[in-house]
Amino acid sequence: MISFGGGVPHDTCIPVAQIQAAFEKVISRLGAQAFRYGPTEGEPKLREFVATWLNRLELNARADQVLIVNGSQQALDLLGKVFIDPGSPVALERPTYLAALQAFSAYGPRYHETALGESGPDLDLLQNALSQGCRFFYTVPTFQNPSGVCYSRAHREEVARLLNDYATVLIEDDPYSQLYYNSTPPPQPLGAYGVARPIFLGTFSKMVAPGFRLGWIWSDYETLRHLVSVKQASDLCTGAFQQHLLVETLGQLDLDAHLAAVRAFYRKQRDDMAGYMERHLKGRLSWSVPKGGMFFWAALRNRSISARALLARCAQKGVAFADGSAFFADGGGTEFLRLNFTQVTREQMDQGLGIMAEEIDSFELEEDRS
Ligand SMILES: Cc1ncc(COP(=O)(O)O)c(C=O)c1O
């Protein structure tokens, strides 16, 4: 199968040698202690690392405001548990991250979606949503999954102002801000624009390795207290060994140099993908080249074809991608598809996108005949 489906880091971007060295060190230094239960809040050294990292991003964080979680996916579930009661209004981007919808929907919210434009959400729609008393606004403002949108500075300021006007909690999810492919980094997190009630989710999945299953929530103390109690009920604590191993790995690794190498690798992948998309899909799909993150977000020009039907045919020919409608709370967006570019080889891009073009054409031929 040629898969443009997932959002998984490339194997060459995982610092295996440093993880191996860290593994030996943790075991020889801590022995059995490395395998105890740990505090629910997380290992102190990792919380400190996260607070320092957040301060670099201009979020004014303290280590005791950080909760270490099993990936930001767990953060989404815990936040759903704490903030959502059946019928609670919740504000989201349209489209939004599929697995956030899965996590929140378990608690029965009423979604208010705000359409995303090139530089951020439609501000009138957002204001309208917030005026309904939403419990929070969930956003991925920097290289969003799936759309790749990165809010401009002006949009960040406006969104922050609206959130404060309506005293709405911001849940900012940020897996991708370090994966930028222009020479300059993206703007600071939305939470750094004077938001009164910021909650910030981060993860080591794309920066180091997803298999650690380590992410974090930074929040105010009151929210943290609730989150700690629901996390305790859910899993007592995040695995202590994986936290010790990550702390040691971060000690072995020059993280800035590692991230620069990861960016260079993905930038080339993105450029290759852009070239093959142009070659095979021009006129059949429309898209813009993402400035960061892991995905092309594209729309079928011929609206009578759905991405889901196209996916069914492509899968029979050994090609997969993500059906865009899964990223819409109401199941709309049937013309969209999301294409990951971090894992595929050049040959797979050429072959897989070529097959997609053939399948789009076969729908059109059938249309012409009928
Ligand atoms: C927007 C967004 N949030 C959260 C996650 C989950 O990340 P983690 O591996 O930390 O659970 C992802 C993973 O792709 C993501 O794209």
Image (spheres, grey):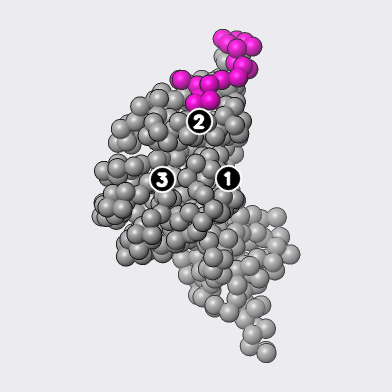
Instruction: Name the amino acid type tagged 1.
Output: Val
Q: Nearer the viewer, residue 230 or 144?
A: 230
- The residue that label 2 is drawn on is 228
Q: Which residue is mark 3?
A: 172
Residue 210 counted in the magenta span:
no
Q: CA distance from mark 3 to mark 2?
A: 19 Å
Q: Is residue 367 left or right of residue 257?
A: right
Q: Quadrant of the N terminus?
A: bottom right
- Rounded to the nearest whole Å, what is the CA distance between mark 1 and mark 2? 28 Å
Check disc 2 and give the amino acid type: Val
Q: Quadrant of residue 346?
A: bottom right
Residue ID at (65%, 59%): 320
Q: Residue furthest front?
A: 86
Q: Please say if the residues under marks 3 and 1 sit with CB atoms less than 8 Å apart.
A: no
Give the percent coordinates (x, y) of residue 165.
27, 52
What residue would you read off at disc 1? 8
Q: Position of residue 129 (x, y in %)?
A: 38, 61
Task: Say if 142 sits above or below 324 in the image.
Answer: above
